[in-house]
Amino acid sequence: MRHGISSTITYFLLVFLLSVPFVAAGSLTGAQILPGVPLAGLAFVCPAVAGIVLARRAAGGAGVRAFLGRAFDASRVRDKRWFLPVVLLYPAVVALSYVLLRLAGVPLPDPDVSLVPAAALAVALFAGALCEELGWSGHATEPLLARWGVAGAGLAVGLVWAVWHWVPLLQVGRTVPWIAWWSLGTVAARVIMVWLFAATGGSVLAMALFHTTLNLAWQLFPVNGSHFPFALVAVLMAGTAAAVVIGNAARRRSPTAQ
């Protein structure tokens, strides 16, 4: 489904509006659904719901079916090798952060991951990531990518994505400096995701898998989510995003680029 920038802005506003009840519930209860994830985290359904609302308004039931059909669109990925960076890039960055901290003498426990609980957590996180990416990638990214390219679309969607999390993060006691580092990493992640989105033919499924790795690595590192170095990972992700943007621009300028 094709739509323009104005529809994307409407989409962003609708996501925030739909999220208000979840944020209010989080403020009133103070409950957490996972360590560091407040009740407002249940607003993960809002990006998908907003997309459904706008798809129905634009094209009725057929529009909704087309929108939801993006959830499992692996056929868009012509070169299946792109699934390797989709599922391994962020875990590699997190693993590098662990090695760097160890080399710096930071006391860290050895990784201890139980496979069955980790797999169950991955399935739950994937469901949430798919709801989000149906909206962030399936609805919002394409018109911005067409107009502003990887860097512009990544920064735009990434900033909205980060701001959408700010109040829930405050609800679980995150400090402003912590949120600033987290936001840097989040925006950088979205720039990388937009690059992968373009490379995978606009696959929402691929983006949901990448999104899952973001949350899963945090919840497991290195033992049940302890000691996660958000600032270091943010710096590493920002460097990776910059390399992606520079490399993508160089490829586009190359006379041999298609």
Image: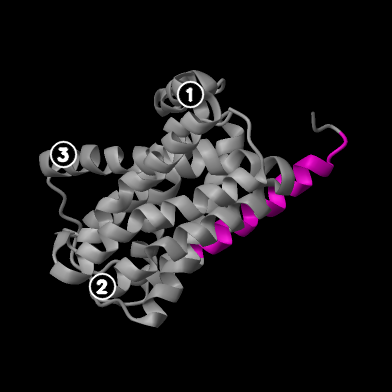
Type of residue at label 1?
A: Gly
| Mark 3 or mark 1: whose residue is earlier in sequence | 1
Q: Is residue 153 left or right of residue 230?
A: right
Front label number (2 vs 3)? 2
Type of residue at label 3?
A: Ala
Q: Quadrant of residue 173?
A: bottom left
Q: Which residue is mark 2?
A: 171
Q: Quadrant of residue 97?
A: bottom left
Q: How many marks?
A: 3
C-alpha span from label 3 to label 1: 35 Å
Note whether 8 is above or below 33 in the view shown.
above
Q: Which residue is mark 1?
A: 60
Does the magenta segment cover residue 248? yes
**Which residue is at a point 38% across and 69% down the rendered structure image?**
166
Q: Nearer the viewer, residue 55 or 197?
A: 55
Is label 1 in contact with label 2 (beta carbons under 8 Å)?
Answer: no
Q: Nearer the viewer, residue 97 or 205?
A: 205
Look at the image and tell me whether residue 198 can be seen: yes
Look at the image and tell me whether residue 36 can be seen: no
| Label 1 element class | helix
Type of residue at label 2?
A: Gln
Mark 1 neighbour density, 10 Å: few (under 14) some (14–19) many (20 or more):
few
Is label 3 in contact with label 1 (beta carbons under 8 Å)?
Answer: no
Note whether 242 is above or below 63 in the view shown.
below
**Which residue is at a point 28% across and 49% down the rendered structure image?**
216
Mark 2 neighbour density, 10 Å: few (under 14) some (14–19) many (20 or more):
many
Mark 3 neighbour density, 10 Å: few (under 14) some (14–19) many (20 or more):
few
Q: Which residue is mark 3?
A: 120
Q: Nearer the viewer, residue 180 or 242?
A: 180
Q: Quadrant of residue 120?
A: top left
Q: What range of the chain is rendered magenta?
A: 236-255
The quadrant of the image that shows the N terminus is top right
